[in-house]
Every structure is written in C-alpha cells, then in structure tokens.
Image (cartoon, rainbow, N blue to C red):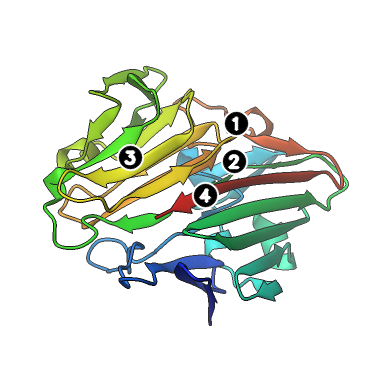
Amino acid sequence: MKYHLSNNFIEVSIKNLGAELCSLRKKDNSLEYIWQGDKKYWNRHSPILFPFVGKLLDNEYIYDNKTYQMGQHGFARDKVFEVFTKEDDYICFKLKSTKETLEIYPFEFELYLSYKLIKTSLEISYKVINKSKNIMYFSIGAHPAFNWPLEKEDKANYYLEFENTKKLERLPLTINGISNKKELINLENNKLALSEELFKDDALVLQNLTNKTITLKNSKDDKSIEMSFEGFPYLGIWSKPSGAPLICIEPWHGIADFIGHNKKLEDKTGIISLDKNEVFESSYTISI
C-alpha cells in the first residue's frame, strides 16, 4: 500500500513495505527525482538498512557464542511497517521485533521511520528503542536512489559537489570485505565528476567527511538534489557500472565487515550499542 504526502511545493509517496520512499516530485513541473525501479538494473527505490549496513563476512555474525545468518543490509527493508502517525505532510511508520526476527536477530526492538515535508525538503528520521534486557547492537542507514540523469541530460554532465572538501577518504570494498588500505580521492573545486567507471569496484565508502552536505548537480541546468546528513559517520555512493540510470547517495551509521573481522557483533566496526529502553535518533534531509 502507498501513502501520499504533499505541501505547496512537493509531493511524495511511501510504501508500507519497508516504509520505502518511492516518489519525490516537485509540484510545479512534476519532475520525478526518485529512481522508479527496474529489474534490469535495481528494483528498489530507497530501502532502509537495518539492523546491519552492508554485507557480513560469509553472511553471518556471532553473538553470545551463537552464530546467526543475515543477508546484506538486514531484514527491515522487506518487512511491512504499520502506520503509527499520519498527517498531510508527515507520516511515521513502526516496525517491532517478532518471533521471526528474534530467530535471526536476538534483540527486541521498536523501529520508527518518519517522513516530514518542509517546503522543498523532505526530512527522513530514524528512531530505535531497545526493548531487550541486554545491550542491543545494530547499524542503520539509508539507500535512496535518484534518477541519473534527472531528465534527458547526458550522464557525463553530472557531478557531486561537497562542501569545503578537497579530498575524500575511501574504504575500498572487496569480495572479502572492506580493506583497511584507505584511498584518497582528490576533488577539483569540491566536485567529484560522475561516470560509470567510478563504480567499477562497487560503491564508494567514505569516512571522515567534515562537512555533511552533498549536492547532485549537472553543468547544463540548475536542477539539483542536496542531501544533508549531520551525525552520520559514513557515506556510500553507488551505481551499477552497466549503464544503470540511477545513483544512490547513502548516509550510514555502520558499514560492511572489514577483511579479517572476527564476526563478533560487539566488535563490529561502526556498530551502535543501546542499553535497555535507551533510544537512538538520527535524521537526514533531501532538498530539491
């Protein structure tokens, strides 16, 4: 089922499956900013990543001396959320642990995902509550995909602009996990030119960004998408190097396992811990 929000400037649609954003349009020209999905390339729009971001080594982790199986990016994106609150320009979805989730993730939780329209911006917020008796370990992140190009422009005219940034610190992804051998990517006038070649070795996993604002632009017109993600320690940038007309800009609290990780959940890089009844909150904003 889809739910719709609108104000005087923009309108969005969100599915209850995964509480996934599936449309973001400006009212004055009906231009669609969100990738609409295509099995040929990637059939999602903007999934939530929970309780893990990225891939676990051998798709498994160890907690309390027990090994659990878990696929890439966790399970929340494939669960039906209930509507917790709904207004014309705001909606909040809720997902809670079940007998089924406890078999693969041994923590009781409540997860809230909300969307709020603010003029030409969309604020997306996360709230996680630990309902377990023990410390809860998790990661959470976003995976919004945007049309690239937005209309009929040449993809080669697009670039990402970072605020006051000369270099990017990349953690290379391999088939065996993230490498500890970080790479530096030099920017020209705060800009990273986009090309399919950029993603030949999978996503760019960035850390230590001082300024947490990034804008997707092109050199031919003024259409743009700005994302602000204060408080997120990592950022993923991804597309398929096969001509896929989409680009994902992904703020993350957490990353895939590093090469050689011992698979223990409490030792995982980027993992968040919550005491009983403790609350974690975070948000990012998309502006068009």
User: Looking at the image, how many numbered discs can be counted on the residues?
Assistant: 4
Comparing labels 1 and 4, the label whose residue is closer to the camera: 4
- Looking at the rendered structure, the kind of residue marked 1 is Lys
Q: Is residue 120 above or below residue 189?
A: below
The tag earlier along the polypeptide, 3 or 4, is 3
Q: Quarter of the image holding residue 63?
A: top right
Q: Which one is in front, 213 or 242?
A: 213
The numbered mark at residue 285 is 4
Comparing labels 3 and 2, the label whose residue is closer to the camera: 3
Q: In this view, does 138 lie above or below 107?
A: above
Q: Which one is in front, 13 or 69?
A: 13
Q: Do the residues labelled 4 and 2 touch (CB within 8 Å)?
A: no
Residue at 67% x, 61% y is 101
Residue at 28% x, 48% y is 239
State the CA–CA distance, disc 4 to disc 2. 32 Å
Residue at 30% x, 71% y is 29
Residue at 52% x, 49% y is 285
State the CA–CA distance, disc 1 to disc 3. 20 Å
Q: Are marks 2 and 1 in contact (CB under 8 Å)?
A: yes
The tag earlier along the polypeptide, 1 or 4, is 1
State the CA–CA distance, disc 3 to disc 2. 22 Å
- Looking at the rendered structure, the kind of residue marked 3 is Ala
Q: Where is residue 230 in the image (x, y as percent from the top left)?
A: 56, 36
Residue named by callout 1: 268
Residue named by callout 2: 61
Mark 3 Cα-neighbour bin, 10 Å: few <14, some 14–19, many ≥20: many
Mark 1 Cα-neighbour bin, 10 Å: few <14, some 14–19, many ≥20: many
